[in-house]
Image (cartoon, helix red, strand yellow):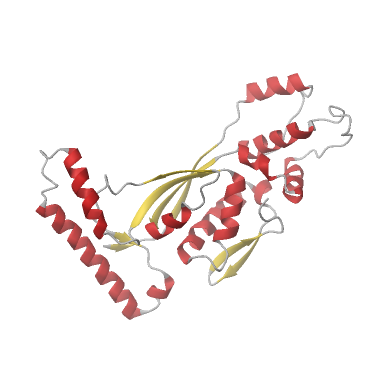
Amino acid sequence: MQIVEPKVFWVGETKIREQELEKYLEWVGAPGWISDATTDSEKIIEAAGRLCYRSFAPGLNKNVTKIREHNKDYLAHILKVGHGSVLEHAFLNFIFVNVSRVFTHELVRHRAGTAISQESLRFVRLHDLSLWAPTVIKEDQEMMTIFMKSGEEMEALQKKMAEIKKLDDPTMKFEQKKKITSAMRRLAPDGVATSIFWSANPRTIRHCIEMRTDPGAEEEIRLVFGMLGEIMQKNFSSLFADYTVEIVDGLPWYKTEHRKV
């Protein structure tokens, strides 16, 4: 049994089909439009917003005589006026590892604008248990001793049950192994480390960061979404430039005047 720390991997994002976008821009009468966005996600959000008002260039819409030329300024205005629906056109992909089922039970409550795939304990046998230890346990030696002992005992039970049912027998069919493994997981703690693939649009990501880095949120989910907030500010600065960060109890709290865009 080992103590682990959560990690966040940013593994993918929406990509633009440039030739098709150029065909649309020619059709709409703005063949020379160029965005200075640094990511495809920010560019596609800008394009969606400009489509709404036909604001790729002055004169395309007779009501529009002046436009914001830079992606950063354009998205800042989108956030300010709360035109959040256009943020839903991009999609970002993450993998959270060494997170507990306590974490994933809370994460899946954010269903709108997400896609979720979690490691299955029907298929993946719990042989070596890993746990993340909350601060309230780590800072108390007696609590930490109980925590470690409990984890080691549950790991030993998993190994014993696997031995009883001969799960390492190479002749056993996978369907039978799955049935036994599914039963054995009932003696696994909610705190057991797992992995989950989480994809979401920036509107949802903003909402989750605001909700889950709040000091009132559970410590582990604050830790993970603090990591996510750092990734978003570093790589999608135009979409997350309005956030300020305050450290509370050693963890970042991401705040903005433009909540629930």
* Residue 18 spot, x, y in % from top left: 63, 25
* Residue 173 spot, x, y in % from top left: 15, 38
207 sits left or right of 171 in the view: right
- In the picture, the quarter occupied by the N terminus is bottom left
Please name the residue shown 22% across and 52% down the image.
183
Please name the residue shown 69% across and 34% down the image.
48
22 w.r.t. 58: above or below: above
Residue 4 vs residue 177, the one in the foreground: 177
* Residue 23 spot, x, y in % from top left: 69, 19
Q: Quadrant of residue 209?
A: bottom right
26 w.r.t. 41: above or below: above
* Residue 72 spot, x, y in % from top left: 73, 44
Q: Quadrant of residue 192?
A: bottom left
139 w.r.t. 130: above or below: below
Residue 62 vs residue 66, the one in the foreground: 62
Q: Quadrant of residue 258?
A: bottom right
214 w.r.t. 67: above or below: below
Residue 235 visible (yes or no): no
193 sits left or right of 209 in the view: left
How many numbered circles does the render carry?
0
Residue 74 visible (yes or no): yes
